[in-house]
Image (cartoon, helix red, strand yellow):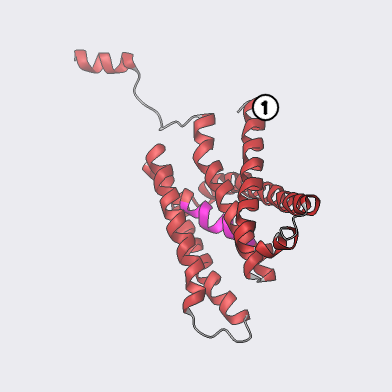
Amino acid sequence: MTIRKWLRFFSMALLIGAVVTVITSFFVQADAYTPYLEPFDLWNLTGAVLWFIGWGLVYSVISQMGFFAYLTVHQFGRGFFGFFWTHVQIVLILIVLFDLVYLRYTRTDDPGSLFPYLIVPAMLLIYSYAVAKVKAKETHPRAFLPALFFMIVVTTVEWIPALRVDEREWVMLMIVPLLAVNTYQLLTLHKIVGFNEGPTESKDHKKKKGSK
């Protein structure tokens, strides 16, 4: 990847993070805008938008750090665990999904029904599965599990600051741009650097085989 391509990749990820965060804030933190609409206060309204743009840029940087850390971890995992790296990824995915339910449920003073705590992990799993299927279709079937691992495990690790606060507005405000930027990175990188399906027979070798 050239510096020019990386800068374009980095800039687009920043833009996606900022735009998605602002759009998400309209729904999950509408109270931040309503005081400046009646009466209309352009100065403070612009300040509120810039505030969320700033958070979006932060989330985007966190996402990009997580993505490039994942690329390193994935190569290390393949080298260290070998064949078992596939099984390790599956186990980690299951652990993370379980913890997203169990830890959030047990940390609440009066958790009530378990069902609401199942919704977020279920939606994360469904969305991640869809993105991983697209990744596998555009590259190779073996890319499905690493893509699913990245979208679930790495996204959750990036999400920890909001999960620790455990306020619904901030939880949603962070996860949506993280998923958007992670999806962009996952489905764009192979288009920039290219994808090699592995060694193939050369044309000369095929001709020799055909002439036998």
- SS for tag 1? helix
x 63%, y 86%: residue: 109
Quadrant location of the C terminus in the rendered image: top left
Residue that lies at the very extreme toward the left in this rendered image = 212
Q: From the viewer's side, name the closer residue of 20 and 42.
A: 42
Residue 64, visible in the rendered structure: no
Q: Position of residue 65 (x, y in %)?
A: 67, 47
Give the side of residue 165 with respect to residue 151, left or right: right
Q: Residues within 10 Å of mark 1 (few under 14, many from 20)?
A: few
* Residue type at numbered disc 1: Ile
x 72%, y 61%: residue: 38
Q: Is residue 52 above or below residue 138?
A: below
Q: Position of residue 3 (x, y in %)?
A: 67, 27
Quadrant location of the N terminus in the rendered image: top right
User: Which span of residues is magenta-colored?
Assistant: 148-159
x 32%, y 13%: residue: 204
Q: Is residue 151 magenta?
A: yes
Give the side of residue 188 with respect to residue 31, left or right: left
Residue 110, visible in the rendered structure: yes
Q: Main secondary structure of the magenta part?
A: helix
Give the side of residue 102 with respect to residue 8, left or right: left
Q: Is residue 6 magenta?
A: no
Q: Which residue is mark 1?
A: 3
Quarter of the view holding residue 139:
top left
Give the side of residue 71 with respect to residue 162, left or right: left
Residue that lies at the very extreme toward the right in this rendered image = 43
Q: From the viewer's side, name the closer residue of 32 and 165.
A: 32
Q: Is residue 172 above or below residue 190?
A: below
Q: From the viewer's side, name the closer residue of 72 and 126.
A: 126
Q: Is residue 31 above or below residue 11?
A: below
Q: Position of residue 18 (x, y in %)?
A: 66, 47
Q: Position of residue 101 (x, y in %)?
A: 52, 73
